[in-house]
């Protein structure tokens, strides 16, 4: 198994700015690069501009997909340069003395697709346009291209350990495919993910299994985005394993895995909590502008509600528990007299401890994965995806 990656190629991809709707330079580069690769590779484009590549002749093919656009909220300065260190890659502008968005979401996936296309004799690859503004490329793709595919792999997930097997209400793959991948052996675990192209393909009728894999980028959609090289290499190992060892056609229709099709609002909101934790100054409007394509079911007011709830649940408890406009003398006794030399005024700064407790113990955060009973944030913290009754039945 090859673990060495061509980081020079990856940095070339990072250097090509390809915001949604303006991917022409990236398309031109990809076509030129793929034509330079050895082997019998057939290239094509559909009417929307998505790129298709088929290498070799086979009854069935492994298939890898990626999207070639990046978010447009982080423009590249003219002197943008990807900087590679021993462990990381990040974007930087010397003139502006600032970090810049890499576009690793999803140029890491594009890169691994090209590496696979170079290595393997029989493979199908698709490069989609405009994923970041609602998966428009995959919405308009040629579904017949996937008729002879064994499965579809996408590397478009932040972090280093998630194997996405369901997105929202859409289950992506068969149990047999998951067993043959054996994610734990490779340091991955099953998770529910956010909107991306494989979900769109399944909703359009893709009849084989699909997964989305963490590929080593962090802080997506921000100028602080980085790639951790070790985590990208870990993803490459898993991709190679799937292509080399999963040789069956893994048929799957949406809805087969009914248990996994549960739409987990709590997990979804936890994802957004992670973004706020990284930068507590983010507003609902900021998050909507940056991530609304990743959470298509959420409106601007939903993001604003989630931000408010985050600060309610995880804000400064010391400040929140103070009473409004209480005036105390320096000797500790209450007073209504105005004596600026000896009084201390404490003002309310946020919801009271009673409001916090009411939210934690009475707000519905999700529903039990077994019986459907409503669960509060406190229940989720104690029992995870199951209510107390089902948790006790399951484990005790």
Image (cartoon, rainbow, N blue to C red):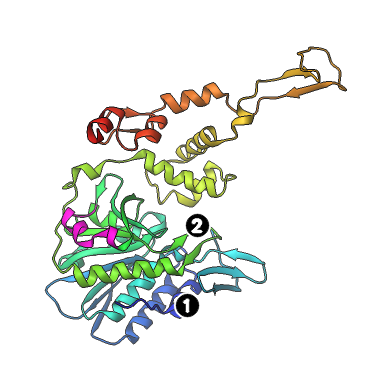
Query: Viewed as shown, does residue 385 lie left or right of 329?
Result: left
Discs 2, 1 touching: Cβ within 8 Å: no
Disc 1 on helix, strand or loop? helix
What numbered label is drawn on residue 338? none
> Where does the magenta region start and end?
172-185
Q: Which residue is situated farthest in the front direction here?
A: 396
Per the model, the C-alpha gap separating discs 2 and 1 is 20 Å
Which quadrant holds the N terminus? bottom left
Mark 1 crowd level (few <14, some 14–19, many ≥20, 10 Å Cα): few
Along the line of sight, the residue nearer the viewer: 82 or 330: 330
Q: Main secondary structure of the magenta part?
A: helix
Q: In the rendered image, is residue 23 in sight? A: yes
Q: Name the residue under label 1.
A: 12
Residue 319: x, y in percent?
Answer: 64, 30
The magenta stretch spans residue 164: no
Note whether 378 is above or below 262 in the view shown.
above
In primary-sequence order, the first of circles 2 and 1 is: 1
Residue 152, above or below 2: above
* Residue beneath the point at 44% across and 48% down: 292
Question: Where is mark 2, residue-wise?
Answer: 219
Q: Which quarter shows the C terminus?
A: top left
């Amino acid at each position: 198994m090859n673990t060495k990656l061509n980081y020079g190629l990856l940095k070339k991809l990072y250097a090509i700015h390809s915001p949604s709707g303006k991917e022409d330079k990236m398309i031109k580069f990809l076509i030129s690069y793929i034509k330079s690769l050895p082997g019998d590779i057939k290239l094509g484009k559909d009417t929307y501009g998505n790129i298709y590549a088929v290498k070799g002749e086979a009854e069935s093919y492994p298939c890898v997909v990626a999207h070639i656009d990046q978010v447009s909220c982080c423009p590249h300065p003219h002197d943008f340069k990807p900087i590679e260190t021993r462990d990381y890659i990040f974007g930087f502008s010397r003139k502006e003395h600032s970090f810049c968005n890499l576009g690793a979401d999803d140029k890491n996936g594009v890169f691994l697709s090209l590496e696979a296309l170079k290595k393997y004799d029989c493979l199908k690859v698709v490069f989609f346009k405009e994923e970041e503004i609602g998966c428009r490329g995959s919405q308009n793709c040629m579904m017949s291209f996937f008729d002879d595919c064994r499965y579809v792999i996408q590397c478009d997930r932040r972090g280093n350990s998630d194997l996405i097997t369901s997105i929202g209400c859409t289950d992506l793959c068969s149990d047999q495919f998951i067993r043959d991948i054996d994610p734990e052996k490779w340091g991955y675990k099953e998770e529910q993910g956010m909107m991306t192209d494989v979900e769109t393909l399944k909703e359009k009728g893709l009849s084989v299994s699909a997964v989305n894999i963490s590929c080593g980028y962090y802080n997506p959609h921000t100028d602080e985005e980085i790639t951790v090289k070790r985590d990208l290499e870990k993803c490459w190992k898993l991709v190679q394993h799937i292509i080399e060892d999963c040789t069956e056609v893994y048929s799957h229709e949406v809805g087969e895995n009914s248990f996994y099709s549960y739409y987990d609002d709590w997990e979804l909101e936890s994802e957004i909590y992670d973004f706020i934790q990284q930068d507590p100054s983010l507003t609902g409007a900021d998050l909507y502008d940056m991530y609304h394509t990743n959470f298509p079911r959420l409106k601007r007011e939903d993001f604003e509600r989630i931000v408010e709830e985050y600060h309610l649940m995880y804000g400064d408890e010391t400040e929140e528990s103070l009473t409004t406009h209480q005036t105390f003398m320096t000797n500790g006794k209450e007073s209504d007299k105005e004596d600026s030399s000896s009084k201390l005024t404490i003002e309310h700064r946020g919801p009271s401890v009673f409001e916090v407790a009411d939210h934690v113990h009475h707000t519905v955060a999700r529903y039990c994965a077994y019986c459907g009973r409503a669960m509060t944030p406190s229940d989720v913290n104690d029992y995870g995806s199951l209510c107390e009754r089902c948790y006790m039945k399951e484990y005790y």
